[in-house]
Image (spheres, rainbow, N blue to C red):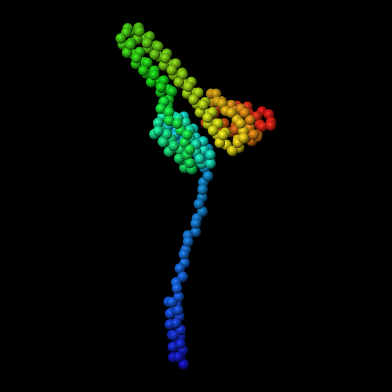
Amino acid sequence: MKSEFMRTASGMMVVGALLFAAAPATARTIRPVAGNTARVAIDDGQLEDAIEKAWKADAKLSARKLDVSVDHGVATISGDVLNAAEKARAEKLAHVAGVTEVKSELKINPDMRPVAEKAADKAKAGTEKAANKTAEGLGTAAEKTKEAAGTAADKTKEAAGATAGAASDTWVTTKVKSKIVGDKTLKGSDISVSTDNGIVTLTGTAKSEAARNRAIALAKATKGTKEVVDKTTVAGGTQ
């Protein structure tokens, strides 16, 4: 009886092994769980500052009057550069982390040397010419020439300073206008900007009090602005 039971158990084990071997293997595909990707939003104003900082750190571009406006990560750059190499350099530096696209409105202007540099070259040429004439003349003539050269240099320096100041005001005006045009809150407003010695004056019509306050805030936040004079009116209201 025991022997028969053992034979039956052995037979069942053999059948089970054969069934297991014949059964098709089931493949399991383990797919990795996708992780969450964290995105850090960078403020457009921070991107503008980063691009301006990169330009100022460049030996050649720091002498150029360049402007940048960033809207939702898209940077629009404008201004004049001396040559194609400077243009390419400015566009490359504008691709800071966080900028998704750079729209270039840069213009190549071969006569982009700083006013002070041009004035210095002109004064130098005038001084050398005067020195040559002085060498041929008398000592008295040399002294007069030296005084004349000094006076001319002072006037040139004053003129260069005045021109630089005007250029700075123009830059501030352009910067404020760019911010106002690109701001969603100010859509539908008609605001004009002028700058005199760092004092920014806003005129025109704002579509709401909120738009008016936004324009003032943008002007105050612009580098180079010393004071903001608001002469705008609110549509349907008063100044």
Image height of 159 relative to 69, above or below:
above
**Percent x, y for residue 225?**
54, 28
At 46% from the left and 70% from the top, the residue drawn is: 26
Q: Quadrant of residue 213?
A: top right
What residue occupies the far left of the structure in this picture?
Answer: 136
**Percent x, y for residue 56?**
44, 33
What is the quadrant of the C terminus in the image?
Answer: top right
Q: Quadrant of residue 27?
A: bottom left
Image height of 43 relative to 201, above or below:
below
What residue occupies the far bottom of the structure in this picture?
Answer: 1
From this viewpoint, is residue 49 visible?
no
Q: Quadrant of residue 15?
A: bottom left
Q: How many marks?
A: 0
At 49% from the left and 25% from the top, the residue drawn is: 167
147 or 203: nearer the viewer: 203
What residue occupies the far right of the structure in this picture?
Answer: 237
Image height of 47 relative to 125, above or below:
below
Image height of 29 relative to 190, above or below:
below
At 51% from the left and 46% from the top, the residue drawn is: 40
**Percent x, y for residue 64?**
44, 29
At 39% from the left and 13% from the top, the residue drawn is: 149
165 or 179: nearer the viewer: 179
From this viewpoint, is residue 142 visible?
yes
**Percent x, y for residue 129?**
34, 14
